[in-house]
Amino acid sequence: MSRFLIIGPPGAGKGTQAARLSTLFGIPAIATGDIFRYNIKNETPLGLEVKSIVDAGDYVPDSLTNELVRSRLEEPDAAAGFLLDGYPRTTSQVRFLDEILAEKHQELDAVIRLVADVEVVVTRLRKRAIEQGRVDDSEEAIRHRQDVFRRETAPLIEVYGDRGLLVTVDGLGDVEVVGERILSGLAERGVAIPDAASAAASDATHG
């Protein structure tokens, strides 16, 4: 039963690491973008509401995002844990997630924070944009998204830092290396991969 958040700037490889952790811990990696797309595609009542807002060019309000996340966390595959990516984004969303977990008598195990040098990330994203022919993805636009991310997440980093939940990891480097850094950080908090935990227990028993 592991419950994580993963936070990181655009281009820090968050999605890749989220998928890796999902497999290792046997929990769903839940990205808010995926929740939106699923509900819109399946024309759920919440999805239809999101679609009308997005089509109008407006931002999806916290209240609706909260309900979509609550609905997703009620799904059977999230009963044994989850990894949330892209939520919460605001302190009010943090409070809502706290309420959801409190209702279930659950709590977060860790908040994984990937950090990356801005210049390296900008170079990486600009290269990717050129390779994929996304001419509108200018360096200025990329830097703006980095600034918005830092501004939005600063309060969350403070909240979860105060709670002692942050596992801060250098997100730059080989995927496997970054993955090992995350696992080491989690292990320091007493959170181990289920298989690794049973193997360690077995070793201790036979040692």
Image (spheres, helix red, strand yellow):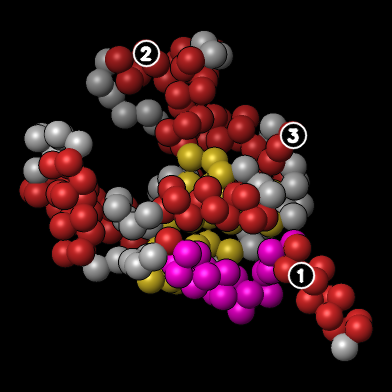
The image's mark for residue 197 is 1
Query: Is 23 within the magenta?
Result: no
Q: Amino acid at mark 2?
A: Ser
The image's mark for residue 90 is none
- Is 153 or 18 nearer to us in this picture? 18
Q: Secondary structure at mark 3?
A: helix
Residue depicted at x 34% and y 62%: 154
Dot in front, 3 or 2: 3
Report how far apart the C-alphas of labels 3 and 2 lie in the structure. 28 Å
- Numbered range of the magenta stretch: 176-194
Q: Amino acid at mark 1?
A: Ala
Residue depicted at x 33% and y 20%: 54
Tell me: 25 left or right of 53: right
- The C terminus, quarter of image: bottom right
Residue depicted at x 66% and y 47%: 27
Dot in front, 2 or 1: 1
Whether the residues at callouts 1 and 3 have beta carbons within 8 Å, the answer is no
The image's mark for residue 52 is 2
Q: Quadrant of residue 25?
A: bottom right
Report how far apart the C-alphas of labels 2 and 1 lie in the structure. 47 Å
- Is 167 or 197 nearer to us in this picture? 197
Residue 160, how many percent across, how many down? 50, 65
**Residue beneath label 3, please?**
76
Counting residues from the N terminus, which is met first, the one under dot 3 or under dot 2?
2
